[in-house]
Image (cartoon, coloured by chain):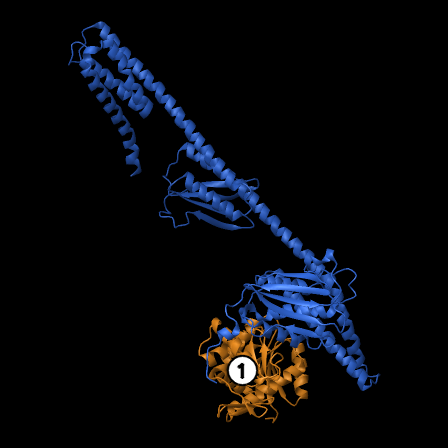
Amino acid sequence: MSAHPQILVIDDELQILRALRTILGQQQYTVHVAHTGEEGLALAAAIQPDVIILDLGLPDINGIEVCSRLRTWSEVPVIILSAHENDQEKVAALDAGADDYLTKPFSADELMARIRVALRHRARTSGAKAAVIQAGNVVIDLAAHLVTRAGAPVKLTATEFKLLAYLASNAGRVLTHQSILTHVWGYAEDSQMEYLRVYIRQLRQKLEENPRNPQLILTESGIGYRLMT
Amino acid sequence: MKPFFLILRPLWRVIAAVLTVGGYSVLLILLKDYFTTSIVALLYLVPVVVSAAFWGGLAGITASILSFLIFNYYFLHPVYTFAVSQPQDILAMFVLLGVAMLISNLMARAQQRLQLVQAREREMRQLYELSAALTGQTDARRVMHILAQRLETIFPGTVAEIQVDTAGMRFAIREPDEPVQHPAANPVRVPLYASRGQIGQIVLYGHANVISLDQERLLQTCASQGAVALERAILAENETRARVLEESDKLKTAILSSVSHELRTPLATIQASATSLFNPDVEFDPEARGELQALLIEEVEHLTQLVGNLLNMSRIEAGALKLQCQWNSLAEIVDTAMRRLRRSAARQRIEVDVADDLPLVYVDQVLMEQVFVNLIGNSLKFAPPETPIRVSALLEGASMQVTVSNQGPPIPAEHIGHIFEKFYLIPGMDSMRGTGLGLSICQGIVEAHGGKIWAENLEKGVAFRFSLPNVSQDNLAGLLPEEEE
């Protein structure tokens, strides 16, 4: 077993595989490759990778199904790759347990950033949960229910804190509207979206340097939100 | 039930004739002393004519015979017997019978002719109504519906089914649209013949098994009218389909010619830069190397955007634009669009005047962001450097009015109505890169949201404006529940 993080790439496009193998190999990752969903699932069970990169357009089974089948026995972070036109599919895959997504075409920087977040998140979930999260000059102490910005305490309402806490405990990862609504409000209905928009604006006004050019809480159009650390 | 009524109806007529003659006879018997027998014989023609006129031949003949008998019994000597003593009375009696029968017969024939004429007239009216209803129909299903409805009116109590089976289509329409109660009962089938052979058939369920010759003739006429209308509609549909295909073919040609240039330019840059970087004989200094790499990235981004535009356009064209509408903050959408435009907007100042506490709008976040990216991107392309671009949104009445304005050159009046058309480029401005897709995508997206988009020349510059109709009732402050901090 190599000490380098193991990455499993499930994609049927040879050129993409070739590029990813080279790029990831350069970054000291050990790369495994599967061309179909079934092969990917089998390989995932055999090598127990640290991160899975999964293309949604596989020839045999739907990427969403790969996610949900994987989730029945594994918590390994899954980053999905998808073509631009199927936003709905991305959301479905995320709701089925994928951790993050990249839209083709994507840059190597974006891919690396996502992989780093996924690895960090994996380390965090497998070990003790981080109680203190730092994002820019904002520090979120989940245990103490304390949020400071540049050292000064920030007053948040209960819902604002709940929302921020959920974003923070998944720092760096995209969270779908649905999962945010379910975690913070307990149920996900279209009408609840209005509250989510309002609370996100409130949080940005309290935490961002410039709420109109947010650096901490990013909007992922059509998908959800992401807290950057 | 029906046959029973059919027997009863002539019976009632005969009874009516009997009653009329009987009543009339009572009156005559009471006034017996005032009339001679020959006058009475003459007077008996009245109930006969009345019966024949009102209740037809059978009633007329019944009235004739009854009058003959009563006249004999009550008025001819010896009275209260059917015997006749005077020979002249015998003559009067048989003249009455003869004339009465003749009149009945004539009246009945006139009646029949009238009924025939009325039936013809009704038929003509029904056929006229059918042809009027079918005129100008270009939708085959609609034609079938009309035909079935008319048939159901013309033949009450039946279920009319129209079946069409041609190369292009195969379906059936039934009126009233309910399951046939006795599908086994022999339906009446009439083929629909058009100029190129049979295109389907009419099936009439629930009609009495035997239909009269007249009804069959009517049904045939309806069928031939229906077949002609149906054929016309099918041909029209085929023609429309052919035209759509031709249009889309033209569109594809236009896309190819417009896009191939746009695709080649970045591809040429990419090829040149990549092969240079790959050339082992050339030592690039870091600056040149960086420049080539930056070019690669920029041109790839350019290509990506182009492909995205083409995809969006083809989806709008195909009517496949599925809106994922949610309540969205317009400010958030503009801010996200600005983030995407950050790099290309470096040379210009973009002033955003979209308050973040405006009421939410019910829109597709991704597509609406694309509208802003395209409109602002368009302004960035045409406005001179260092001039500001303004993005603003205001609530006007029940809709949100959005404006993206720049200080670029005015759009010539003859072009301003066309700039939202696909591939429309203003002549003389083609030094700019463009496919003429950005604005038509904006239009497609805004209209899919039920809004309108247009361009206006300002005193200084150009404004692109669009409206969004689905705006939430409350502004944001009103939405927020009170909560302890």
In this rendering, the answer to whether A16 lies above or below B10 is below
In this rendering, the answer to whether B274 lies above or below B169 is below
Give the crowd class for mark 1: few <14, some 14-19, many >=20 residues within 10 Å.
few
Amino acid at dot 1:
Ala
Q: Residue B335: x, y in percent?
A: 62, 75
Q: Residue at x 65, y 80 (%)?
A: A17
Q: Residue at x 27, y 14 (%)?
A: B43
In this rendering, the answer to whether B28 lies above or below A155 is above
Residue at the outermost top position: B87
Q: Quadrant of residue B302?
A: bottom right
Q: Residue B245: x, y in percent?
A: 64, 54
Residue topped by disc 1: A42
Q: Residue B272: x, y in percent?
A: 80, 75
Q: Residue at x 38, y 22 (%)?
A: B110
Pick whichever, B118 or B436, lies toward us: B436
Quadrant of the rendering where the N terminus of chain A is positioned: bottom right
In this rendering, the answer to whether B232 lies above or below B114 is below
Task: Determine whether, in the image, residue B79 is placed left or right of residue A134.
Answer: left
Query: Which color has been applied to chain A in this rendered view?
Result: orange
Pick whichever, B418 or B482, lies toward us: B482
Residue A105 visible in the snapshot: no
Q: Quadrant of residue B91?
A: top left
- Identify the subunit bearing mark 1: A
Secondary structure found at label 1: helix
Q: Which chain is blue?
A: B
Task: Determine whether, in the image, residue A218 is placed left or right of residue B461.
Answer: left
Task: Determine whether, in the image, residue A166 is placed left or right of residue B188.
Answer: right
Q: Residue A186: x, y in percent?
A: 44, 79
Residue B110 visible in the snapshot: yes
Quadrant of the rendering where the C terminus of chain A is positioned: bottom right
Q: Quadrant of residue A89?
A: bottom right
Task: Determine whether, in the image, residue B254 is placed left or right of residue B179.
Answer: right
